[in-house]
Amino acid sequence: MVEVEQWAELRRAHFVGKKSIKALARETGLSRNTIRQALRSDTPPKYERAPTESVLEPFKPEIHRLLKADPKLPGVRVRELLEPLGCTAGKTVVDDYLREVRPLFAAPVRTFQRTVYRPGEVCQFDVWQPREEIPVGHGQTRLGWVVVACLGYSRAGAGMLVFSKETPDLLTGIAGCLTRLGALPGTLVWDRQAGIHGHGGRPSDAFAGFCGQLKVGWKFCEPADPQAKGAVERLQGYAETNFEPGRVFANELDFQDQLDRWFEKVNARTHKTLRVRPIDRLAEERKVMAALPAEMPDTTRRWVVRVPPDPFLRIDTNDYSLDPALVGRRVEVQVDQRTVRAAALDTGEIACKHQRTFAKHRTTIALEHARTQRESRRPVDTPVQTRPLDRYDQLIA
């Protein structure tokens, strides 16, 4: 049989060198018929072995039955079940065949499409939990979360630190991210985060009210489908590996300040996929996005209490002083990420205004409250009746 190299040389010598078949036979020692066959063949010669039946052939129906019952059945177990039937195939033979046919019995593999976002179309959100607790003063640290946002078109990102995953704090995080991005997208995309998602793909009342005030839409991903918001997932993964490691934070305000400056740097870098800077695309995207309202929706916690005789308000294990002059009257409490405030319902008098602390078991007393309480507790001179001593003598006699 003529080898590939020899076949190519014969064709070159005949068609290019114009050598005759007789001359080629004399030079190579091959028969003229062999040379004619090589010259007539347009494809290289190859050796084809006669097909033989696989040792697994009689057992393939049984393998198919086993995989139909359990597509994840391991190869070791398949060989064990085939041995009583007389199968002597080795590990490599069985594993190679299983690798070939197992996908036919497994559940369909999910496929993904590439998504192209229009400017201002969507903003994806997620919640990231830093590995280390955040310093909050007084020698204490506390577990925190960061609400992360990423615009689909520009990939510009923003983040805001909160200290709970309750609805008011999550909404505060959303408002903070949108404020940092500088405009409103058409749709807010979330996974089924408790407090944001209600039931069955419907929003919670608080989140729906929040979106309604901003005039934006919402969309929830299907359960266990993080790929649907891959832009923010990749940004969050980048933050986990590049923002937190090697950093030291003085308190929660320092954490937020460093986070904002880090996002400014990230948004100004060239995006690996887009090949442009997100900050440049953001400028283009803001032109078609809705403007921010003069005031973002109110995410303050509010409730009404009656000022107790011990005029203090307990919030998140911390006590904040109230005006002792308002004891017994009802006040509306307002708590946000920065302040704790309260005002009398009937007259609007300020009951308190404190800077909120995220440390635990602390007591905050306003100086004017302490003075008022001290003055109200001054001893008052009370006249005491005195009796003549002889009256006691008469009682004893």
Image (tube, helix red, strand yellow):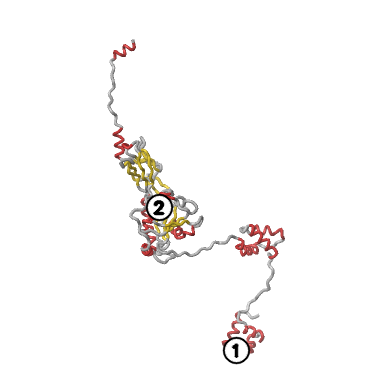
Residue type marked 2: Phe
Badge 1: residue crowd in 10 Å (few <14, some 14–19, many ≥20): some
Give left or right: position of 177 versus 84.
Answer: left
Alpha carbon separation for disc pair 2 and 1: 88 Å
Q: Is residue 176 left or right of residue 222?
A: left
- Image quadrant of residue 365? top left
Using residue 110 as the reference point, say whether residue 21 is left or right of it. right
Q: Crowdedness of circle 2 by 10 Å Cα count: few (<14), some, many (20+)? A: some
Q: Quadrant of residue 174?
A: bottom left
Dividing the image into 4 quarters, which one contains the N terminus? bottom right
Instruction: Answer whether residue 44 is visible to the viewer in this image.
Output: yes
Q: Nearer the viewer, residue 300 or 206?
A: 206
Is residue 241 visible in the rendered structure shown here? no
| Front residue of this view, candidates 300 and 362 | 300
Determine the residue located farthest toward the top in the rendered image.
Answer: 397
Query: Would you identify the image quadrant in which residue 32 lies?
Result: bottom right
**Residue 162 numbered tag:** none
Which sits earlier in the primary sequence, circle 2 or circle 1? 1
| Residue to which mark 1 is pinned | 19
* Residue 295 percent location from the top left of the image: 34, 53
| Amino acid at dot 1 | Lys
> Which residue is disc 2 drawn over?
210
Could you tell me which residue is drawn at 29 percent across and 31 percent down? 378
Image location (x, y in percent) of residue 79: 67, 59
Q: Secondary structure at mark 2?
A: helix
